[in-house]
Amino acid sequence: MKNTHIPFLTSRCCANVLLALGIASALPLSVVSAQENSGTNKIAEEEAVELIVVSASRLKSRPGYEAPTPTTVLDSAFINDVGVVNVADALNRMPSMGSATSPRSSGNDVGSGVQGANFLNLRGIGSNRTLVLLDGRRVVSAASTGQVDINMLPSTLLKRTEIVSGGASAAWGSDAVAGVVNLVLDKQFTGVKGSVQAGRSGYDDADEFKANLAAGFEFADGRGHVIGSLNYTSADGVDRADSRDWFRSTKLVNNPDYAEGNGQPQRLVLDNVGNFIGSDAGHTFLSAGPLAGITFSPDGALLPFNFGTRYSGGPLGSSITGDGQLNDFSARTQILAEYEQVTSFLHATYDVTEDLTVYGEYMYGTTEGESLSVPYYRFAGALTIARDNPYLPAELATQMDNFGMTSIPLGRSNVDFGRANPYNERDMTRYLVGADLEINDNWSMAAYYQRGSIDVVNETRSDANTAKYALAVDAISDGNGNAICRSSLTDPSNGCVAANIFGLGAPSQASIDYVIGTARQDLELTQDVLSITFSGDLAELDAGAVSTSFGYEYRKEQFTGKADPISQVSGWWVGNYKDAGGEYDVNEVFAEVLVPIFYDSPLGNSLDFNAAVRLTDYSTSGNVTTWKGGLTYEIGAGVSLRGTQSRDIRAPNLNEYYSGGQTNSLYFNDPFVENPLGEGVANYLVTRTIRGNPELSPEEADTTTFGIVYEPEFIEDLSLSLDYFHINVDGAIDTVLDQDIVDRCYNNETSFCSFIQRDSATGLMSNIFNSPVNLTEEVLTAYDVEATYRFDLADGNVDIRSFWTYTKEHYVEDRGVRDDLLGEFAGGNGAVNGGPQKWASLTSIRFTDYENTISLRHRYIGEGVIDAEWTSGVDVDNNKVDAVSYFDLTASRRFDMGDIRFEVFASIDNLLDKEPPRVGFDGGTALDDLGVSNTRHDLIGRYFRLGLRFDY
């Protein structure tokens, strides 16, 4: 992929434009003409009378009815104000959203195939528990894990986004445990509009570019309507964490001064920490005895290697800069993946008669994404070099002879062989045909069929073939002064090229080319959906009509995956994909009803009862029933109450059921074996395979919501709401952390021991297998507060909107063991990088008139902890992760040229350039922990955007 540098766009340029726009936005407040003022009022009036029917219900309900399920509606102005290149980045700023996959979190990920993708994670309980819809219909997943890539959806035609909080499975089906995010398009758009924008960070990197075009027109004397859009986006990556001032090689290590009862904390969060068991140039390890601590210059000369102050725990044992040579993989961890994307969308409707409308839809999108991961490191004795290796420096060879050594252990990062380079292409196609029929004045029918497919090329480039590497480093002389592979003595035609590993840059390009290759998997996912819904009124009561909606839906999900031959036998360093495939289908019938209890009564303005039920038959797991019951009570004087109780489900996705497995090599602590160096337990490299589990059952969630809405009659355009949520997921599907498998086996949970294979000769672990399982339960309790207020100022309007989320509890429980996750950034329990914090908020203040808009936003991410079950000063010296506030600023100015309206805009994200707070990750053996959270906090820094929109 090519870098997308935009020469005219510099940080200073964009800052100056933004300042100018801001001044321009303020100046006209007192000089707007009467004509412009009437235009402003017209805009306000149009916004005021628009009828919004939201996704909390399938019912065609009466005007003014509010469903009992809390729903937040965000219009296109919200997305424009944020100014980001994709909708997901805007939505993920909402406090109700938790950590999710995005280009900012997938930079170091291997094997997922989602580089450049953007998922939504409502409530922070898993993106696969958030159902994403486009105009109320499902979209094929971006991966076998079941999530929809928001980046693939047609954002240019977006009219509004509806976030339905709380369970919605009875209305919309599986996956809506946390809620539904429905993207609603403007299907009546007529004209042409588009935009172009570019961005760059204050570090003059992370360039992005986006261009959009949309059009809509009528045909056949207004009986037909067509809309379409074309979008292009590209974004450069940021390849090294140490390009940022906040990077300090922060790690969590064991406290060497700790002893039970002595008042010292068990762990320490320290800066400038790296591993001492391997280096870029390579060095002799501690087990080399008298020859330990020798490293090499680029030409192979011997140099001393200082192991520094050693700590157990942390990244494979740790050393502290100042008295040791720092080797920290996280310094070169990618903090932003690069991607390039093109999407297209077409929708056409035609009124066959006054009562019958048919429509069709086509969507195509392609994404190319890549990132950088770790090289094929060989640490802590995993690399042993024989005395007869001709690349062995002469001085070292002499010393080995003096001590009678026939081999010597090395630790080497192998960064000069290249870093693993995850790369993927995703091509999505979606077809849809449907019909809407007005049966009579009371009843209507809506039916559609859609087929979606996505082809994924999932590669790990610059991957090391482990068998070839072992042959290449085992060099021997051919007797004529040439270094060859020892294996070539018995197999001269094996093509092996000997590698010199003594010193950074020592391996020849020929030896690198021999070792390095590409692991690959080709995936195809398809989704078929057939749906028919009838809606109408059953009866007319004194309080209003009893409305209902019922129907049938069929869905089939399937995938196939084909891996390369070397991956099949786990011959690569990372990747090692496996052939896989599977399918399931679902038959569902559903019904929903709205019953008005009273209207304009002495007991209040209105009381409505809403109920829904869905009967689901899975081909894999049988029958499940989901349901919902709720009340909406408008008391009067602007006060309303709402509440629901629901049973919701999430069925296992294709990956959880049928994954053929992916094998990598990871370092594990082995509490059954003592460290040969005499420091804690042994830590060594083990092959780990993740695979599916066809015995999984759907998880079931009981969800309770209760809320109050206050819209005081004496303050126009002020709305306040408070909602309570309690979600209890029974049989929650999750994968136990790899290290936990070993630890729980050691703690006499014998069922976990079956996932571990040990070498019969050495007693060491050789293989660990991991699969998703049904845990006992996962529980979350939270409160949402939303406040909106609009008032006139001079010749324009000021809109204030504030969202706050307070999470009271979040925990999982498995076999009687409770694990608290609340506010956790780095606990060793699956919440790595982002359980929901106690407090989070987003507040915006926006002024707009006919020509100008200026918006200031404040994002607050509350205080968190490293591990929710730790205490500062006892388990760790400081368990706290600081809160952080971000301010974002956007300004725009509109002007007309004939019939074309233009809008130039500029924005600054992270206006004050706030650094992410330190997080000491409880990663145990992780080599690439950044010391910050890449899913909750901003790692890029101050960011500038400049763009132009037009509308004709």
Image (cartoon, rainbow, N blue to C red):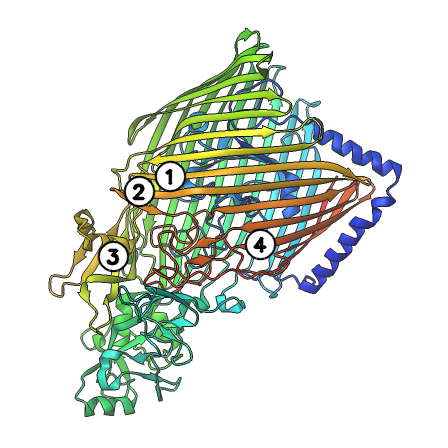
Amino acid under label 3? Val
Left or right, residue 181 beside residue 789: left
Mark 1 vs 3, N-terminal side? 3
Per the image, the residue denoted by label 4 is: 885
Amino acid carrying label 2: it is Glu
**Which residue has dot 2 on it?**
813
* C-alpha span from label 1 to label 3: 40 Å
Residue found at x 14% / y 63% = 763
Q: On the image, which quarter does residue 50 sit in?
A: top right
Q: Position of residue 606 (x, y in %)?
A: 58, 16
- Rendering coords of residue 71 (x, y %): 54, 32
Q: In this view, does 537 lie above or below 252?
A: above
- Of marks 1 and 3, the one in the foreground: 1
Q: What amino acid is found at the position of numbered circle 4 in the picture?
A: Ser
Question: Residue 779 got which mark?
Answer: 1
Position in image of residue 185 (x %, y %): 60, 34
In the image, is 197 to the left or to the right of 154?
A: right
> Disc 3 marks which residue?
569
Callouts 2 and 1 close, C-beta under 8 Å: yes
Residue 158 shows in this picture:
no
